[in-house]
């Protein structure tokens, strides 16, 4: 296994902490705002849970995901096309193993991608290759990952781009799995799900979408997500999870039902991120950065033309910690990723430092 990438910026973190006004840590997208009361109340109400949860998930939870998918994704599913997950990262890491990939298998991942896509392939002892567009996906691909909106870049794929990737996957009999955990956080483009009828009609054969409540509901500490799509692939996932004991706790399942039923808290949180994004975006541009992609999601993908580690150190001298772009692939060598997941006060402090007034 490769070293955990964030260990590489430990020295930059130490430097940033020396700033007299403290560190502004924008290197990891971990939510900082309170979990909404509608969710915490549901969790508390479900606290008495002496029995084991099921791998398939409570019927009311799966129905809540079905209703949410219809409302938000325009996708019409049934409860057999949903399985809850322990957040989305465990799916990214374990799906190659779940699908039985091995040393003779190949996983196709986006050219710029969160490191866990590659780690998941390695956990299955499979190889991985990167692609920029559907035509780059090799003939020997056994699993194809999509990530839109992208982490780290915030790029949003179009319906036509998604169609081309699905067609390539079906040509190769390779499942196409789309990580869509930022889909409700569109800024300059409206993200579209791989399950949207404009992309796949009503045929979910060979396609899955992975979703998470961590960002949209400040629920990262609960670990709650889901996989939606192809009935047979969902059944395969459920079957292995039964054996492996990969179960979402009953209180978290019932809290998730409450989270999925309430759109109001999502709108409130999105407005907070929009404000922080505007402040940070303006400050970075004023400091000479160019913001690329970043149409959706919780990050700004920024470059000032320098090597990413030089930029990380330059920012650290100002007490700001960012993630170097090469964490996500060689194509990110001259970019840094800055998260919007900091308090209003910390984002304002970062903006002041970038302007030279603090």
Image (cartoon, helix red, strand yellow):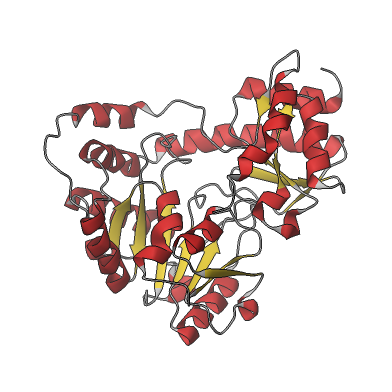
Q: Nearer the viewer, residue 284 or 23?
A: 23
One can see residue 74 in this view: no
Residue found 72% across the figure and 14% down from its top: 21
Q: Quadrant of residue 264?
A: top left
Q: How many numbered marks, from 0 up? A: 0
Q: Nearer the viewer, residue 313 or 190?
A: 313
Q: State left or right for residue 357 relative to residue 111.
A: right
Residue found 79% across the figure and 22% down from its top: 352
Question: Can you say whether 339 is above or below 16 in the image?
Answer: below
Q: Nearer the viewer, residue 73 or 60?
A: 60
Residue found 58% across the figure and 53% down from its top: 115
From this viewpoint, which residue is outermost toward the top?
20
Question: Can you say whether 173 is above or below 236 in the image?
Answer: below
Residue 149, percent from left and from top: 57, 55
Q: State left or right for residue 291 relative to residue 94.
A: right
Where the C terminus falls, by quadrant? top right
């Amino acid at each position: 296994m490769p070293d955990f990438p964030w260990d590489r910026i430990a020295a930059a973190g130490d430097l940033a902490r020396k700033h007299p006004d403290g560190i502004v840590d924008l290197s990891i997208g971990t939510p900082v705002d309170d979990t909404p009361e509608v969710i915490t109340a549901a969790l508390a109400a479900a606290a008495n849970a002496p029995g084991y949860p099921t791998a398939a998930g409570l019927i009311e939870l799966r129905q809540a995901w079905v209703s949410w998918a219809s409302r938000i994704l325009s996708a019409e599913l049934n409860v057999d096309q949903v399985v809850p997950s322990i957040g989305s990262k465990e799916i990214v890491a374990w799906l190659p193993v779940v699908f039985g990939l091995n040393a003779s298998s190949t996983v196709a991942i986006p050219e710029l991608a969160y490191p866990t896509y590659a780690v998941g392939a390695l956990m299955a002892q499979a190889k991985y290759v990167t692609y920029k567009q559907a035509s780059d996906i090799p003939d020997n691909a056994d699993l194809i990952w999509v990530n839109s909106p992208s982490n780290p870049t915030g790029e949003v794929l179009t319906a036509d781009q998604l169609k081309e990737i699905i067609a390539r996957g079906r040509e190769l009999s390779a499942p196409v799995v789309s990580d869509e955990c930022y889909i409700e956080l569109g800024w300059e483009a409206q993200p579209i799900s791989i399950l949207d009828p404009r992309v796949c009609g009503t045929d979910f054969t060979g396609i899955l979408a992975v979703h998470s409540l961590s960002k949209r509901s400040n629920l990262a500490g609960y670990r709650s997500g889901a996989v939606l799509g192809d009935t047979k692939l969902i059944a395969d996932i459920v079957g292995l999870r039964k054996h492996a004991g990969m179960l979402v706790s009953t209180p978290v399942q019932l809290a998730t039902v409450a989270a999925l039923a309430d759109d109001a808290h999502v709108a409130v949180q999105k407005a907070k991120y929009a404000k922080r994004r505007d402040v940070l975006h303006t400050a970075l541009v004023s400091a000479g950065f160019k913001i690329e992609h970043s149409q959706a999601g919780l990050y700004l993908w920024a470059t000032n033309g320098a090597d990413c580690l030089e930029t990380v150190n330059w920012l650290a001298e100002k007490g700001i910690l960012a993630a170097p772009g090469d964490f996500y692939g060689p194509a990110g060598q001259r970019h840094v990723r800055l998260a919007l997941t900091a308090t209003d006060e910390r984002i304002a402090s970062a903006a002041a430092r970038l302007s030279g007034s603090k």
